[in-house]
Amino acid sequence: MLTYFTILISGIIISAMLAFLAIKMAFRLGIMDKPGLERKIHKAPTPLLGGVGIFLTFIVLAFIFKDELLAGDLEVHHLLGVLAGSLFLIIGGVLDDKYDLTPGKQFIFPILAVLAVVAGGVGIEKITNPFGGLTYLDQLRIPILNFGNGMHYFMVLADTFTILWLLGMMYTTKLLDGMDGLVTGVTAIGAFIIFLFTMTTKYYQPDIGIAALILTGACLGFLIFNWHPAKIFLGESGSLFLGFILGVLAIISGGKIAIALLVMGIPILDVAWTIIRRLAAGKNPLKFADRKHLHFRLFDLGLGTRKTVLIFYLFSIVFGLSALFLQSRGKLLTLGLLIVIMLGMVVGIEKKIKTKS
């Protein structure tokens, strides 16, 4: 228990120190988020590069506790794949924050990230069927290369599912990143719930728990500077990296996708609704930015940044913790409840905003 506490506190301290340095570096390099666009609610230019500090915190602590991380099912090639994927996101994100890359160029780096993870052997080979038993995704495979320990395969269903899952998680946190502390706090909650899950007797995985706790500490340390009014933002690198690493943790903790889905349920449904809404309006869902995300609509009702963010935290905590006590069918029903809540919130908020205007 002392080791876990040490990891958490170390993550908070190192992340806070690196966030402070990232603020100075962003000012020096001119990597700032300037207000002016409709969807930006901050009043003054704010440093980016927050994701770099979180990433470095994660890497430093992962190296320090590498023996503990490799004591279970994780192997070196898994960690190398995740590291390579993370580096792609950080490099691409910093370039985008500095030079405002086109959407096509932006998309290259998340694709490289998920391919690196798949190449590193991280994937979802089976998922629990809510109606009983397991569904295996590694049956259909295509030989790729023969090296090292033998033939390496592209598992069509498993690897495709992994790629789509990680891209979905990355773009959920990317589109959610519109308010101070929102993505950082929700990710910290998700990582800590995965840590709690790996500490249970039935699913005891201390190696995965340590990785989740490192992410929790890294997010909490950064949140000191990212809480409203934020002194630094995550930037493109941070918003993508947090969704990426949380998605990876959900996979390597035994394919417990339902936990991440319940923690991120409202944001994921908001992204789904945004895509449907923009497509219906003839807009490119990835190019067209607006203020109709759920967090912006709550803000427009007069709740303000802090109350809006705390509402999202509450949903993540309540529904995330429920995953610790529910079986597969119960989780499915809870996801259905989330959909109903999301639809009710969208309809209710739009009515209030129209009445208000």
Image (spheres, rainbow, N blue to C red):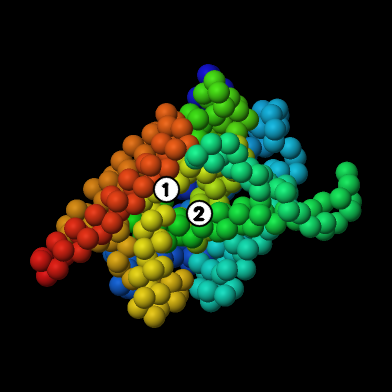
Q: Is residue 142 visible?
A: yes
Mark 2 and 1 residues: CB-CB less than 8 Å, in contact?
yes
Q: Is residue 255 visible?
A: no
Q: For mark 2, give the secondary structure.
A: helix
Q: Residue 223 sits in which quadrant?
A: top left
Residue 255 to residue 39: above or below: above
Residue under the image location 33 percent in, 66 percent down: 40
Q: Residue 209 appears at what percent x and percent y?
A: 56, 31
Image quarter of the C terminus: bottom left
Residue count near mark 1 (Cα–Cα under 10 Å), binned few <14, some 14–19, many ≥20: many
Q: Residue 356 appears at what percent x and percent y?
A: 10, 65
Residue 295 in the figure: left or right of residue 326: left
Tell me the kind of residue under disc 2.
Answer: Met
Q: Residue 264 has which mark? A: 1
Q: Residue 178 appears at what percent x and percent y?
A: 36, 60
Residue under the image location 34 percent in, 56 percent down: 179
Q: Residue 169 has which mark? A: 2
Q: Earlier in the sequence, mark 2 or mark 1?
A: 2
Q: Nearer the viewer, residue 199 or 79?
A: 199
Q: Residue 357 has which mark? A: none
